[in-house]
Amino acid sequence: MKHCIIVIWAGVLFLFPALASAAASSHVSLDLTHHWVGFVALAIFVVAYTLVIFEEQLHMRKSKPVLLAAGLIWILIAFVYSGQSDHHSAEEAIRHNFLEYAELFFFLLVAMTYINAMLERGVFDSLRDWLVLKGFSYKSLFWLTGFLAFFISPVADNLTTALIMCAVIMAVGKDKPQFIAIGCVNIVVAANAGGAFSPFGDITTLMVWQKGIIEFFTFFNLLLPSLVNFVIPAAIMHLALPSGQPAVVEDEPEQMKTGGLVIVGLFILTIVTAVCFHNFLHLPPVFGMMTGLAYLKLFGYYLRKKGRSQFDHSDMPTNHKIEDDFDIFDKIAKAEWDTLFFFYGVILAVGGLGFIGYLGMTSAFMYGELGPTTANILVGVMSAIVDNIPVMFAVLTMNPAMNETQWLLVTLTAGVGGSLLSIGSAAGVALMGQARGFYTFFSHLKWTPAIALGYGASIWVHFLINS
């Protein structure tokens, strides 16, 4: 299986179109696909991404190999262009790719900071405890956690949403391993489906929105196809659920800390601000997100000043006097830095391969001979095997001639295709660790036919209502 993944990933490199960064340059890029530099660059990337695939086995964070790969690939490119006395083409291309990353970085940093602030205030813990203490049946909890994952992930990210819902499943299903396994599959499918119809639900949808290809409210045309993608496999899995209800948990629920709900409101206001920056001021939405970060920073200042007078509540980032002290810099520091640096490595490395010319070798075949519909459906299937971020980034930067229906299709398939396998999404990989021994690759694979049925049905519904 592992060797199969490596071979397929190598194939993905040839099946995806060239990046448009070189096209934005005033210089003509060299075709290095048959040059030794091109071969070495491709080998570097394949080795690096193989290490990413085996992150769990190697216990090495995924950002490390791709960061090194990105640097080495651009060193090779710069070496060749310098030999041609061209000192500007590579520079312009890498600057273009870096700007793409910078916008994504700051956007995600703000979103992650808000999520960390809500976690620290106990917002999600309160939701979890409410579900656990209500005494729902197994079947009710299955659908509740699924629908909550579906509707929370468009605002939060699908990874955080999946982890929270999995905590509920683990707490109430400890005596029913079968329920935990099926519940985790349902959560992964629901979180990925929910993230597909919102610019904030997944990295791929965020990239599509920031690129300006699809308007903010147009994403919601995917609501019904995404719902179908979740409901059909859930209805099939429902038949295998145990009857009855779990024993009532008597633990005292955790109390939400002061300001938890206010931070939820500020996050919604931040999203509105980002949308307004993009739709009305025609500014990149990342600037709206950074403005929204100021809302949280100012409210954090208020929370610190509101504390007991005998403690020092300075606004300096290094003062930590009491356990309930709210420090905004703590929330920023706890962002998923490994993920953010992984995005840097992927975007710069894929951008380098595109500049070399490898990814453009078969673009005419993918979107010409096969046609955009087949190509975009294959994008989703490939997303189940490799990360959907480099796949979507390659499609975006090539910018094939497609209408809105096709762009919505590739957004949908890239978002929900990862549900076909447990390793196809960050939510699936995380839950394999959180529910270790209960939710595994093969427990998910057992339901892949049902998930594939939902995948196909969601595509059919999309064409039915959006074409």
Image (spheres, helix red, strand yellow):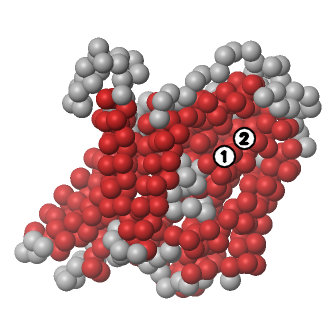
For disc 1, the marked residue is: 149
Furthest residue in direction left, as rendered = 85
Q: Position of residue 166 (x, y in %)?
A: 66, 34
Indicate the amino acid at tag 1. Answer: Ala
- Based on the displayed image, in which of its 4 quarters is residue 230 positioned? bottom right
The one nearer the camera, 358 or 315, is 315
Element carrying mark 2 = helix
Q: Position of residue 246 (x, y in %)?
A: 83, 24
Left or right side of 322 for 240: right
State the residue at coordinates (48%, 65%): 392
Q: Position of residue 308 (x, y in %)?
A: 35, 19
106 versus 56 height, above or below: below
Pick the quarter of the image with the C terminus. bottom right
Indicate the amino acid at tag 2. Answer: Thr
State if disc 1 and disc 2 touch (CB < 8 Å).
Answer: yes
- Based on the displayed image, in which of its 4 quarters is residue 431 positioned? top right
Q: Label 2: how many residues lie within 10 Å, few (<14), some (14-19) or many (20+)?
A: many
- Based on the displayed image, in which of its 4 quarters is residue 145 positioned? top right
For disc 2, the marked residue is: 145
292 versus 457 height, above or below: above
State the residue at coordinates (86%, 44%): 238
Q: Label 1: how many residues lie within 10 Å, few (<14), some (14-19) or many (20+)?
A: many
Left or right side of 337 for 209: right
The one nearer the camera, 287 or 94, is 287
Camera sees residue 26: yes
